[in-house]
Image (cartoon, helix red, strand yellow):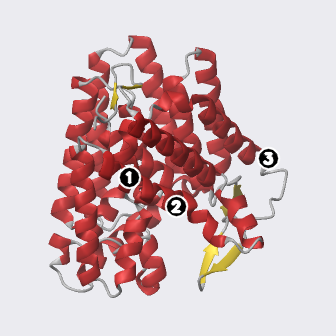
């Protein structure tokens, strides 16, 4: 049985019947997943009213089934997908033994299902076939944020009880008196990251230049309304990347320069959290502007990052080498280990607590080599801005548990061209 492959044009070719069906399953899995994520707050609200809270998990269940089908039918296994999936399952098994409850580790694996799905599904779809759909989603997210200041959504600030757990439908909050608008997302930073991801894809694949510019400017305006500093910083960085690339014609020296930037981002992601274990940072937050811009970053330096890393000390110092296992930090911890709950707010910190420091460092080093290979050797220039977004935002956020970003990371790492 032959399997489908991606041609040099990026489109699926040589598709026997089984792969045609697989491609359709993958396509609709992605469509359903993105719709549910973009409209998560109103969907949770409506499902709860109808007593159908479980329906919000349908896309993830479909993703799990699709991955099993792909593994069963795919003749040629993607080495990257296989390796990273094995790592995730191995540390899930380790978490079953190491953590206080087995459910915590299993839930930790459940959280990263979009990442695993992205790893395995990449050979069965072409992002350009989603272009109109992505444009519609971009309009929905933008409209949701723009309307938020003028219309009080019924799901805003709502908390529901699901399986004896309080679930926040949509966070209603402010920063120094400035409202943080979330639109149809569960939180303002979710809306900002979703919008930025969609804008990057539209800039990469839409042909008309004025549409690219319009989408990018609209994304920037909406991110300002969310007051999410991480996505805004990434938006500014990628504005330089796209503008400079257009001006110099995407020459190799420009891509090499941004590979250096990518390496620097990874260095910052690692250095600052580790340094908080021995350095007490003091940021001057006397004026209103500095408090608005840097108060959350100061919190990360002051307690979030050092306390997250010190989770490795709780049950034995060997955890610095081995990690706590899947579910050892983040969402799973919030449910099964609430008194110790910390969200990490950094991609390296999240990886370090789960896999241990050596493995986390190896994964980020391998990430750089993977991006370098895809960008310079295979010349997949569209992978670099997506991973600049993931890593740049990953300095101040737990991007692995952000479903759409996690999916994008899996697709980017596993893509072969």
Q: Residue at x 38, y 40 (%)?
A: 122
Label 3 sits on residue: 147
Provide residue 229's location: percent of width, then percent of height: 54, 49
Front residue of this view, candidates 52 and 169: 52
Label 2 neighbour load within 10 Å: few <14, some 14-19, many 20+: some
Front residue of this view, candidates 369 and 225: 369
Tell which tag, 2 or 3, sits nearer the viewer: 3
Q: In the figure, is residue 288 to the left or right of 68?
A: right
Q: In the figure, is residue 222 to the left or right of 66?
A: right
Please tell me which of labels 1 and 3 falls first in the chain. Answer: 1
Please tell me which of labels 1 and 2 falls first in the chain. Answer: 1
Residue 387 makes an appearance in the image: no
Give the CA separation, mark 1 to mark 2.
47 Å
Label 1 neighbour load within 10 Å: few <14, some 14-19, many 20+: few
What is the quadrant of residue 212 in the picture? Answer: top right
Give the CA separation, mark 2 to mark 3.
27 Å
Provide residue 294's location: percent of width, then percent of height: 50, 56
146 relative to 251, above or below: below
Q: Secondary structure at mark 3?
A: helix
Provide residue 104's location: percent of width, then percent of height: 39, 79
Q: Residue at x 57, y 44 (%)?
A: 31
Label 1 sits on residue: 69
Provide residue 56's location: percent of width, then percent of height: 61, 64
**Mark carried by residue 295:** 2
Q: Quadrant of the N terminus?
A: top left
Tell which tag, 1 or 3, sits nearer the viewer: 1
Q: Residue at x 30, y 78 (%)?
A: 311
């Amino acid at each position: 049985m032959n399997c489908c492959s991606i041609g040099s044009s990026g489109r699926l070719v040589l598709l026997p019947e089984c792969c045609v069906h697989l491609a359709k399953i993958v396509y609709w899995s992605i469509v359903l997943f993105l719709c549910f994520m973009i409209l998560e707050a109103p969907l949770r609200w409506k499902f709860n009213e109808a007593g159908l809270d479980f329906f919000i998990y349908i896309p993830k269940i479909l993703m799990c089934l699709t991955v099993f089908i792909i593994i069963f039918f795919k003749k040629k296994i993607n080495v990257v997908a296989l390796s990273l999936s094995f790592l995730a399952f191995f540390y899930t098994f380790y978490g079953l033994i190491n953590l206080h409850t087995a459910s915590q580790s299993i839930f930790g694996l459940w959280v990263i299902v979009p990442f695993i799905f992205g790893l395995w599904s990449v050979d069965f779809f072409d992002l350009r076939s989603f272009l109109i759909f992505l444009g519609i989603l971009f309009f929905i997210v933008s409209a949701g944020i723009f309307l938020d200041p003028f219309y009080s959504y019924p799901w805003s600030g709502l908390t529901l009880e699901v399986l004896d757990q309080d679930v926040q439908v949509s966070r209603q909050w402010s920063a120094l008196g400035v409202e943080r608008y979330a639109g149809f997302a569960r939180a303002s930073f979710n809306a900002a990251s979703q919008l930025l991801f969609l804008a990057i894809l539209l800039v990469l694949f839409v042909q008309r230049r004025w549409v690219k510019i319009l989408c990018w400017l609209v994304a920037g305006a909406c991110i300002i309304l969310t007051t999410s500093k991480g996505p805004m910083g990434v938006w500014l960085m990628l504005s330089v990347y796209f503008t400079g690339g257009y001006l110099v014609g995407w020459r190799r020296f420009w891509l090499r320069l941004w590979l250096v930037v990518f390496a620097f981002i990874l260095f910052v992601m690692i250095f600052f959290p580790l340094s908080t274990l021995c350095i007490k940072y003091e940021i001057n937050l006397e004026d209103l502007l500095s408090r608005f811009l840097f108060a959350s970053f100061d919190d990360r330096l002051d307690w979030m990052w050092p306390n997250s890393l010190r989770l490795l000390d709780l049950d034995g110092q060997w955890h610095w080498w081995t990690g706590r296992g899947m579910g050892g930090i983040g969402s799973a911890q919030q449910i099964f280990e609430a008194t110790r709950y910390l969200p990490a707010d950094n991609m390296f910190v999240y990886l370090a607590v789960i896999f241990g420091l050596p493995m986390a460092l190896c994964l980020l080093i391998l990430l750089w080599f993977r991006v370098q290979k895809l960008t310079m050797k295979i010349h997949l220039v569209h992978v670099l801005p997506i991973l600049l977004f993931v890593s740049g935002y990953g300095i101040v956020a737990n991007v692995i548990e952000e479903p759409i970003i996690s999916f994008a990371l899996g697709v980017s790492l596993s893509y072969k061209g």
